[in-house]
Image (cartoon, grey):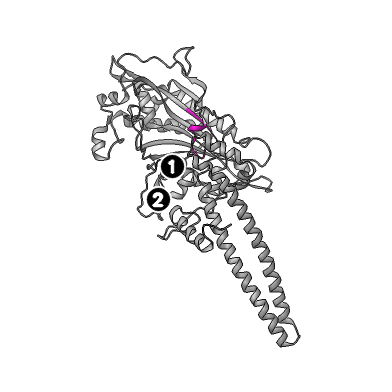
Amino acid sequence: MSIRGGPAAARRWAARVRSTVGVRASSTSGQSRVLQAPRFNFKDIRARPEVYIDSIRERRMAPRIREYVPKILELYERRIEIEKRKNTEFLDRKDLHQAMDALRKSTADKQAVAGQRAELAGALSAVKKRLQTLEDDLRAVEVELEDLVEDVPNILSPTAPRNDEPRPIRILNPPTAETSSERPPAVRPGQKSHLEIGLERGLVDVETASRISGSKCYYLLNEAVQLELALVQYGLAVAARHGYRMMMPPSIVRTEIVRACGFRPRDGDSERQIYDVTADVDEGLSLAATAEIPMAGWGANKVFREQDAPIKWVGVSRSYRAEAGSRGSGAKGLYRVHEFTKVEMFAFAWPGAGEGAPDALSAGLHEEMREIQEEIIGGLGLCARVMEMPASDLGASAYKKYDIEAWMPGRTVGDVGGSWGEVTSTSNCLDFQARRMNTRVRAADGASLEFAHTLNGTAMAVPRVIAALLENGYDEATGRVAVPAVLQPYMGCASF
């Protein structure tokens, strides 16, 4: 099989790919890669390609990505073939070196020995050239393999709905015993949106922000600032009670970390989703769209101990999203913005090395994260629905995902008044991110070294929760907003 026109062409192509996507490359601008080469699970793709094709199809990814799977299998077989040939050449080279050493010690006729040495030298030179060609071919194959597999998503949980509809689990704080996900709370006449309430009460200024920073930006003012800080403290406190240690991660991260987490700088329509903060593509710095990214990066190139797992963090940071293409009335105000504060839970789990479901040992931790989210949102008194999300809603790294959507009576989607709005999500990514981050866990007996499972979950998406609290807690008669009891110790008041 010729690799895109032979070894020379392959080398040129590989160099081009490395310079554009950063695969196993070092920056020419002074910032070298921090991640080792990813350890993709080619053996699993080879063993059950239909599982990966199903994941691509059910996530509604571009049809061309399905075609990557057979290409990956073809290239993987090619890599195995090249490695076998390399091993053969290495053995031949070893035999030739041994023969050359024997000639050096030989007491035979010098002229005859010289002829044999010249013959062996020629054979060694030929082996060296063949090995160089094989190395070039192998490098080209590996670069192409990695370039293709980067777009292949994680496998899917068998329970993830395949019909594009989330599976309802429960309702938090239902207004009536009969309330279900199909019957949301009623919207009272004259219901105001959080933006209207915020503008009237002097809690938010979007007009000035649009001039200073652009659309989808905002100033929080007066009690809204206290409310944000209270929500952060509350989210941290609940997570800490469940054994999560606190972290304040950086918001500027290397782009290679962003990609290793499964995020892409641009979506399928080539619209920007992640902010780049350096003009030089080799420099590769981005603004984190969520604390999940730098928190996952905290485990890069590390080996944890099984007895220390799970390692659980809760982090607070500013998050930045380009939100390209987000339009419509449902995205107004604080619901979909470019910059916001977020509290995030993240965990590294021991995956185990035995048989059974892929998430046999990390599933319990995933359920714990969801229960913490329910405690946080439920404690705020918000009516919300908990759902297992369909495959089509999962990001590339997620194996299984839960969302909680709060009822927002003032949020208008299309012509419909009142809407559910996502305020938390939690995902189990299995070893998808860890294989790209080189994050591993050593068994307690030291017998095995496995890639960790990584899990993430929102503890507090501040602007959206503020929106929900304003719309649900506003009293038209008094013009005041009720403060949930769990926030009153941080706010120092019952309303404002």
- Quadrant of residue 52 within the rendered picture: top right
> Which numbered circle lies on residue 12?
none
> Of callouts 2 and 1, which one flags the residue occurring earlier in the amino acid sequence?
1
2 vs 1, front mark: 2
Report the disc number at residue 285. 2
Q: Where is residue 296 in the image (x, y as percent from the top left)?
A: 50, 44
Q: Can residue 54 be seen in this view?
A: yes
Disc 2 residue type (three-letter) = Leu
Cα–Cα gap, marks 2 and 1? 19 Å
Toward the viewer: 212 or 50? Answer: 50
x then y, percent, for residue 280: 37, 55
Residue 402 colored magenta? yes
The residue carrying pointer 1 sits among few (fewer than 14), some (14 to 19) or many (20 or more) residues within 10 Å by Cα, namely: some
Residue 310 seen from this side: no
Q: Which mark is residue 248?
A: 1
Q: Can you give x and y, in whole percent of width and height, for residue 299 in the image?
A: 52, 46
The residue tagged with tag 1: helix, strand or loop? loop
Q: Quadrant of the N terminus?
A: bottom right
Does 259 appear above or below 184? Answer: below
Q: Nearer the viewer, residue 414 or 67?
A: 67
Query: How many labels were placed on the picture?
Result: 2
Few, some or many C-alpha atoms within 10 Å of disc 2 (few <14, some 14-19, many ≥20)? many
Q: Is residue 75 on the magenta stretch?
A: no
Q: What element carries label 2?
A: strand
- Cβ–Cβ below 8 Å for labels 2 and 1? no
Quadrant housing residue 289: top left
| Residue drawn 52% across the image and 48% down it | 148
For the record, the magenta segment spans 391-403
